[in-house]
Amino acid sequence: MGCDIHLFSEKKKIVNDKEVWVNADYWTINPYFGDDEYEQELDIVSIYNNRNYDLFNVLAGVRGNGPSWDGDGHSHSYLTLAELKEYYKNNSHTPHNGFLSKQQIKELDEDNHTPYSWRSEWSHPNFEYREWKEISPLKVIVDKVDERMRKEFWVREDEEDTSKFDDRFRIVFWFEVFCLASLFLHLQSHLVPKSHKVPKPNL
């Protein structure tokens, strides 16, 4: 079971002489609208539309708060592009550790092919403990949000210093409640040290 990430974009602009956050998402017409009561008229062109436990862990912990559960979703929050870039600059890779098979170790050592899955505890003599790093899944978000910001504020692709715009563009996000049990087990087995226990959510 995955963890659905709901993500929307917003930008700051002047409305009625006040600076406010307004939606900056793109939308398309749903060709199936009207077929039944569940079809909405417009579909969002999302900046990110995938399931990723590591990305959940990063987004929920950028400000150091970690995952939190509330109401119908969990870890409701927002991050400006400036915050995303600063965090990625200091955390460009995600550390992992676990027990790998001989084939996985061979692929990791010879081809730098990181494993898709691994064992969190030793359970077989043919498995060995290894540590490795992967490019942070946050890079995809930073690149996509930066691209959207440039379109909204008419910033050229070759313009490197975008600091005056980065604080004026943000993502708003939360995660589906249905995946909490699976997320809890995953965080305990792969993303946190054994000495630290993730508080069990109330389901």
Image (spheres, helix red, strand yellow):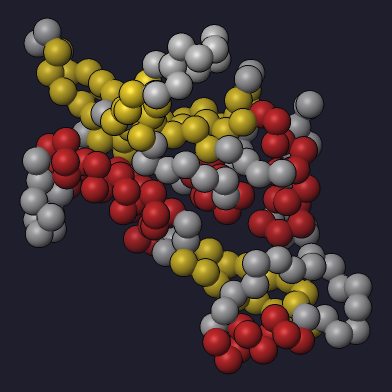
Displayed quadrant of residue 138: bottom left
Q: Position of residue 120 (x, y in %)?
A: 79, 65
Residue visible at 66% across and 44% down? 2
Residue visible at 55% across and 87% down? 111
Displayed quadrant of residue 14: top left
Q: Residue furthest bottom?
A: 110
Image quadrant in which the N terminus is located? top right
For residue 80, side relative to residue 132 (left or right): left
For residue 59, side relative to residue 70 (left or right): left
Residue visible at 12% across and 8% down? 16
For residue 166, side relative to residue 175 (left or right): left
| Vertical order, 17 against 119 (above or below) | above
Does residue 37 appear in the picture of this structure? Answer: yes
| Vertical order, 100 against 148 (above or below) | below
| Vertical order, 168 against 53 (above or below) | above
Q: Position of residue 199 (x, y in %)?
A: 75, 39
Residue visible at 73% across and 85% down? 103
Q: Nearer the viewer, residue 98 or 63?
A: 98
Q: Position of residue 182 (x, y in %)?
A: 75, 43
Image quadrant in which the C terminus is located? top right
| Vertical order, 159 against 152 (above or below) | below
Does residue 65 appear in the picture of this structure? Answer: no
For residue 165, side relative to residue 118 (left or right): left
Q: Position of residue 27 (x, y in %)?
A: 31, 27
Q: Nearer the viewer, residue 88 or 157?
A: 157
Displayed quadrant of residue 80: top left
